[in-house]
Structure formats: structure tokens, C-alpha cells
């Protein structure tokens, strides 16, 4: 049977180990962090002696430990849900990326031959979406010019 020390003034629940040198601060956290068969010794002030807790404080501390356990489980479930959501989003992005690799850009033969223009002007393309089996030959996609460049007729 292990002895767990709790010092309500100088102990700490975050870095405490329940030892005489590094005690816990609260009985509830000590019950949560230690095995069931542990013996608890509590000190209320710096000059006092360690003594066993009363039954009522032990009962209250067990409720606190139960709350900490529920909080821990809830946090773990939340992490699992977030991980599943992140994995699902990643798979969705990869699926979209794979689908976008199947898009084929084709020049419409019924239109006049495209002329090479300065890269600061807009570019008009004909799009065929092979993965959907749809032909958007009547549609045009406009890729805007670089930022800060005015669009207009060529002076050449």
C-alpha cells in the first residue's frame, strides 16, 4: 500500500508526485492520480503534521476525482473526433486533387487561332471536364492578369 501525501498550502497538482518531497495540493487530485489502495495523508498548514483525511472530506474528494476522470475521458473523445475529422478532410482533399489531375484543357477548333500576347493580359481557355463526362466547349474560363497590371489593348 502506497502512501500519498497532500499539502494544501505548498503542494501542487500539476507537478506534484504525491511524495513527501513533492506532495499534491488537493485530495481529489491525489485520489484521481494514485492507485485505489493508497493511504492518504493530508497536511492543512506548513507547521502541522500529516494526518489521515476525514470520511466526509474523502467522500467529497472521490466526487472530485470522478469529475476529473469524466473530464479526461471527454478530452480523449474530443481528440479522437478531431483526429477522425482531420483524416476525413485530408482524404477529401486528396480525392479532389486526384480528380483535378483528370481535367484536360483543349483549344476549341471553331474559334480563330489563339495569338500569343503579353503575359500581363487575361488568357481565355476552353475547358473539358473528362471526369464528369461533360463538355464545356461553349464555356470560357478567364484567368485574370497579374495584380497591379492594367488590362487593355496591346499597343504593338
Image (tube, helix red, strand yellow):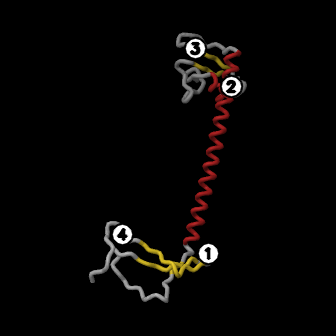
Work out which quarter of the rendered image holds the N terminus and state it: top right
Q: Position of residue 90 (x, y in %)?
A: 58, 59
Q: Residue tagged by mark 2?
A: 63
Given this view, does label 2 or label 1 mark the residue nearer the observer?
1
Residue 109 to residue 52: above or below: below
Residue 19 to residue 93: above or below: above
- Sequence-earlier tag: 4 or 1: 1
Q: Are marks 2 and 3 in contact (CB under 8 Å)?
A: no
Q: Position of residue 143 (x, y in %)?
A: 43, 73
Q: CA distance from mark 1 to mark 3?
A: 73 Å
Q: Residue tagged by mark 3?
A: 44
Q: CA distance from mark 4 to mark 1?
A: 30 Å
Question: Around disc 4, counting alpha carbons within 10 Å, would you say few (fewer than 14), some (14 to 19), or many (20 or more)?
Answer: few
- Sequence-earlier tag: 4 or 3: 3
Tag shown at residue 146? 4
- The residue that appears at 62% across and 57% down in the rendered structure is 88
Q: Secondary structure at mark 1?
A: loop
Q: Residue tagged by mark 1?
A: 132
Question: Around disc 3, counting alpha carbons within 10 Å, would you say few (fewer than 14), some (14 to 19), or many (20 or more)?
Answer: some
Q: CA distance from mark 2 to mark 4?
A: 64 Å
Given this view, does label 4 or label 3 mark the residue nearer the observer?
4
Q: Residue furthest right?
A: 37
Q: Is 142 positioned to the left or the right of 63 in the image?
A: left
Q: Quadrant of residue 37?
A: top right
Given this view, does label 2 or label 3 mark the residue nearer the observer?
2
Amino acid at each position: 500500500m502506497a502512501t500519498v501525501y497532500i499539502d494544501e498550502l505548498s503542494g501542487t497538482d500539476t507537478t506534484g508526485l504525491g511524495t513527501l518531497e513533492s506532495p499534491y495540493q488537493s485530495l481529489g487530485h491525489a485520489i484521481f492520480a494514485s492507485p485505489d489502495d493508497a493511504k492518504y495523508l493530508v497536511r492543512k498548514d506548513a507547521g502541522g503534521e500529516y494526518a489521515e483525511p476525514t470520511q466526509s472530506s474523502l467522500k467529497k474528494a472521490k466526487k472530485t476525482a470522478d469529475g476529473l476522470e469524466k473530464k479526461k475521458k471527454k478530452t480523449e473523445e474530443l481528440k479522437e473526433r478531431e483526429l477522425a475529422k482531420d483524416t476525413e478532410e485530408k482524404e477529401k482533399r486528396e480525392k479532389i486533387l486526384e480528380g483535378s489531375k483528370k481535367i484536360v484543357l483543349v483549344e476549341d477548333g471553331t474559334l480563330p487561332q489563339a495569338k500569343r500576347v503579353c503575359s500581363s493580359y487575361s488568357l481565355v481557355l476552353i475547358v473539358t471536364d473528362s471526369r464528369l463526362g461533360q463538355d464545356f466547349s461553349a464555356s470560357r474560363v478567364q484567368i485574370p492578369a497579374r495584380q497591379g497590371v492594367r488590362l487593355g489593348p496591346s499597343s504593338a
